[in-house]
Image: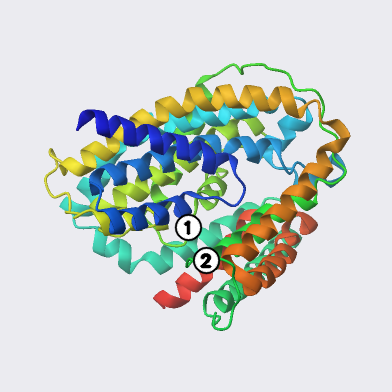
Amino acid sequence: MLLLYIIFVLIGVGLGIITGLTPGFHVNNVALIILYIYSSFHINPLLLANLIVANMITHTFVDFIPSTFFGAPSEDTSLSVLPMHRLLLRGEGFKAIYISTYGSLLATIFALPLIPLFQIALVNMDLANSLYFYTPLLLSLIILGLLYLESRKNLKSVFFSLLVIAISGAFGYIALHFPLNHNYAVFSNGMSILFPIFTGLFGIPVLLLSQNTIVPEQKIIKPEIKGKHYFSSFVGTLSGSLVGFLPGVTSGVAAAISRIFIKEDDTENFLYALGSVNTANYIFNLAALFLILRPRSAAVNVIAQMLNISLWFNTKFPPSSFVLILLTVAIASLLSFFITIALGKGFAKGIGKIGRKYGLISRILIVILFAIIFIFTGIIGVVFGIIATLIGLLPPKFGVMRVHLMSVIIIPVLIAYL
């Protein structure tokens, strides 16, 4: 059994590398495939669940490689330059990978001791019901918090942010309630319409803005890690843990929330928080399954369908399945750290040789993404992807944070609760 467990975890890590590096291929897709395998072949569900967990955690590490090296805008569109792209355009792409990866590893170290505290609060102190009751209020406070961050700039930014929130929210509500009858798709595998929506909002606009970018030679330099970086990572972990229990809130929102405690212009500090946010969010998605019996992501929902989940009542002794899952989190995090550093070094050496061909790669990726959208979500998916892309271009145009685009989910969830 131990050998099989190790094999399945390693397979999950391998799949995490693939999903992390492949545009349009997400952990949720892998989870759906695993669910099909489970229902067809009745393989040990605990082994399959830990495979999914290893896939999820590894993805949060490796995903920073394409996020850093692809889709970087040129400096003349500086308002749309993401933190990791700022370093890439300075020839420090590897540094961005190292920082975010180290932040992800720290998130695991910080998150594991926090889980028992959440168990005490949500289960022993019975705050889980209050969490459900106050979810609309918490979601509203998150939106207000994001607007507060924009108010640090000027009132015009607040106005444009409200406009993006309204448009994204209306689009999300329409898209999620749109009838998919008579839709033509090559493979009708039930892939969510959220796939073209998120790809259009966050992926394709970044690639479109990188057409004239020239990437300089990259320096392979490890950053100096200071005490403030550990604090930033802890802030990111806390932010990721809090949103991990809320519906419709992603790690991007948690990263924006962490900016309340981190200076806007401190790129490296923010990257430590960003790396921690992503991994912590997934860890606490898993914790939510055992503490409030509510999966907060599609991949965790698949785990819930395969395992007989029991609530963690006893403070000292969590369910054995949860203990094994947390062990997988630790193993996958450690392996992913070294794997991502090695892959990041290779990408950094290669990307610096591309130079003026960078825009061509972006155009090829756009074509690939729309092809994937058409294959799995059909004509309607392509239409939604195009509309989402146009909306996704608004934040860099207006000079506001992209995270407001998450209203595409937050607003429909708020409406459903109210």
The residue type indicated by label 2 comes to: Ile
For mark 2, does the 10 Å Cα neighbourhood hold few (<14), some (14 to 19), or many (20 or more) residues?
A: many
Dot placed on the residue nearer the N-terminal end, 2 or 1: 1
Q: Quadrant of residue 225?
A: top right
Q: Are the residues tagged 2 and 1 within 8 Å (C-beta)?
A: yes
**Residue occupying the point 72% across, 37% down:** 85
**Residue occupying the point 78% across, 59% down:** 398
Disc 2, SS: helix
Disc 1, SS: loop
Q: Quadrant of residue 179?
A: bottom right
In the image, is residue 108 above or below residue 277? above
Quarter placement of the C terminus:
bottom left
The residue type indicated by label 1 comes to: Val
**Residue occupying the point 24% across, 51% down:** 290
* Label drawn at residue 409: 2
Horizontal side of 135 relative to 145 (left or right) equals left
**Residue occupying the point 53% across, 74% down:** 176
In the image, is residue 189 above or below residue 145? below
Reading the image, the residue beneath label 1 is 249
